[in-house]
Every structure is written in structure tokens, then in C-alpha cells.
Image: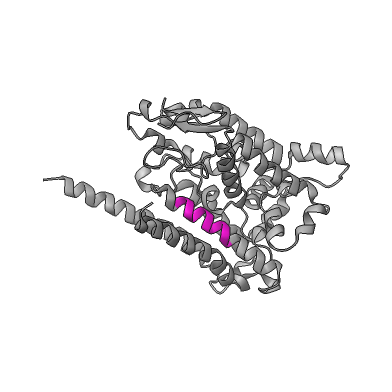
Amino acid sequence: MRIPERAKAWWAFVLAASAVPTSYLIAMPCGGACAGCPMGGGCFLAYPALVTLAVGAKALRFGKGLLKQKP
Amino acid sequence: MKTKETLIRNRWRYLSFVVGFFLFVAPFALFTRAVYLIVGNTAEPTLHSVCFRMPIDWIFGGRFYSIFGSSWFMAAFVFGVIISSIFLGAAFCGWLCPVGAVSEAISRAVPIPNRFRLRIRDTKLTVSMRYGFLVGFIIVAALVGYKLASDQLGSICCRYCASSVLQNFASALFGDLSAVEYWQSGAIISLLFWLVAGGLFMSGGRGWCLFFCPLGALSGIAHKVGAKLGFYRVEYEKGSCTGCNKCQDLCPMWAIKEDHTVERTLCVNCKECVHACNAYKLLRGRKVADT
């Protein structure tokens, strides 16, 4: 594996490994109830919004690719 | 048409998923019920009775003794799945697990074009993320288990658990109205990651299995060890490959690398690549000559 690829893989590993404890600690006061969380149940809206953003970005890139193909 | 083809191609695996649902999910939980009957346990079994994550949490959280306690059956089941992966590959994940089955089924049944679905083509990146999340799970288990974090945190496997979500869906569906009270933020996040982000909007519909299932990740390691020792595995033969990349498109676990070889830690023995292309063969015994 080349060095940049290896670095990318390690970076992904470290990000993923740190994401779990971080997100877990952020959600700590929630105690398993939406109203107790500092996000106030915002995750219920935030996660679909994140997915929509990601899919939207993908669709935009696809659209740009189509436009580039045309003369 | 595509859905029909998928159904025919995977008929045995999908039938096995239905069997898996009846074996592990209450009110049926036939497998657990049978074991409870043999050992004289009078508890009402559910999917939690064979929690796929709790024994892993116990071990890394310093509660090793729990696996010898009243929940020994749960630990025996999880270790059984991991050990069987050495010999059969991660067959439990690919053929029986009801959690992965539901998200994969939803992904296959809802005809969203693939261009709107997320997919990581680089298997090294997928593997890094998968095992990164496993390490994160272990870190939280240790933080909570060794009282380095607040007691209020509770166990990671119970807070974010797709199995609980599935069990409560099933219980509510079969008339247990107390299951309706279950919903809390952790359950909603799990539901979204399991069925929406990881199911509907991920190619193959196995986002939860890929990134958030510690049992799946450990089974992947066991399969890699087993394949090196010459047990059951899928092998790629370059000579028969036409380069159509159908194998990469069909693999629900994104386990086909750019050079079309199989990433063992991700493979769940679903045989999609074997059905799609002659270049993939199921093998046992020592490795054939490198191609």
C-alpha cells in the first residue's frame, strides 16, 4: 500500500474510533429520553437532514457530470 | 424485473433469513426457546436473550465474570458465531442474522437508483472505518465498565441497539403494546442509522453491519484467519474475469476490491459474486495457485 493510501486508511480508522466515544459522551445527559438531551430531540431531524444533504450532494455531482457531457 | 432476479438469485438466502427471524425474534424465538427448554430456564426468550453485542461489552468492560453467570448462553452463542466463522465464513451474518436481513431487504425492495445511494469503493477505507468503529465501541465499553465515565452513561450496546429496535417493532406488530413505550433518542438514532442511512441510502443496505456491528467485525477477523488456514472461502480467479464489475455492484458488503479479489474481513458468504461471475469460486482446503 502506498503511503498516501495508508495515511488515508489510518485517518479513517482514527476518525471512526474517536467518533463513537465522542458521540456517546455528547448524548450523555439524554439518559435515553429525547427531552433530556441537549439537542432536545434535534437528532430526530438532524440525521435525516444529514442523509438528505449527502444524497443531494451526490445528485448535484451527477447532474454536473451530465451537463459536462453535453457539447 | 431486477427485484425478481434478485429474489430468484438469493432465494435460499432469503428463505434462511425468514428462518432466522423465527429462530431469534420473539414472540417466536424458537432456537432460544428450545435451548431454554433443555436447560430448564423458564424466562420468556426474545432477541435480547442472544444479544449479539453484550458479551463483547462485558469482556472489554472488565465484567468477564458475567459470561459465566446466568447469561452464559448469550456468551456461548456469540463465541459460537465467531468460532463458526473460522470454518464457514461469516455465515451467520450473511444467512441468519435478522438485523442485517431486514435492512438488506428494505434496500433491495425499495427501488431507489444506485446513484442516490452511498457506497465506498475503496475497501481499505471501509475496513478502516469498520474496525475504527469497533475500537470506539471497545473504548466506550471500557470507559463505562471501569467507571472512568459517569454511571449515567449506561451500556453502549443497550443505548444504540438495532436488535432492540427490531425486537420492539416485532413485539408491537404481534400485539405487545408495552413495546410502544420503548422509543427514546438512542433507539431513534439506531433506527435511522440501521434502516434509513444504512439501509435505504446505502448500496447493499448493510450499513449497520458494516460499521456498527461488533459481532460482524469480529466474525470478519475470524473468517480471515479461517481462510488463511484453508477453510471455506470465496476465491477469485483472474483468468475468467471479463472486468464487467458486476461483482462490485452486487456485493452488499462492498467486499470486492479494485483488483476484484475478496476482502475477507467484509465478506459474509452471501455468494452474490459467485452467482454473478464465473471468476469467483467457493473453495475449501489449501489455496490454489495465485492467479
User: In x, y percent, where is residue B277?
Assistant: 41, 27
Q: Which secondary structure dominates the residues rendered in magenta?
A: helix
Name, please, the residue furthest toward the left.
A71
User: In x, y percent, where is residue A40?
Assistant: 55, 71
Residue at 53% in and 28% down: B283
Identify which residue, A43 or B264, lies in the foreground: B264
Identify which residue, B250 or B6, lies in the foreground: B250
Residue B119 visible: no
Quarter containing the C terminus of chain B:
top left
Quarter of the view holding residue B91: top right
Residue B73 lies, with reference to residue B146, above or below; the image says: above
Find out whether residue B132 is within the magenta segment.
yes
Find out whether residue B276 is within the magenta segment.
no
Task: Count the labels in the image.
Answer: 0
Magenta residue span: B126-136
Quarter containing the N terminus of chain B:
top left
Identify which residue, A54 or B121, lies in the foreground: B121
User: In x, y percent, where is residue B271?
Assistant: 51, 31
User: In x, y percent, where is residue B18?
Assistant: 63, 34
Query: Going by the image, does B189 lie left or right of B280?
Result: right
Quarter of the view holding residue B183: bottom right
Residue B287 visible: yes
Residue at 47% in and 64% down: A15
Residue at 54% in and 35% down: B269
Identify which residue, B209 or A39, lies in the foreground: B209
Colour scheme: one colour
Query: Going by the image, does B238 lie left or right of B38?
Result: left
Residue B237 lies, with reference to residue A57, above or below; the image says: above
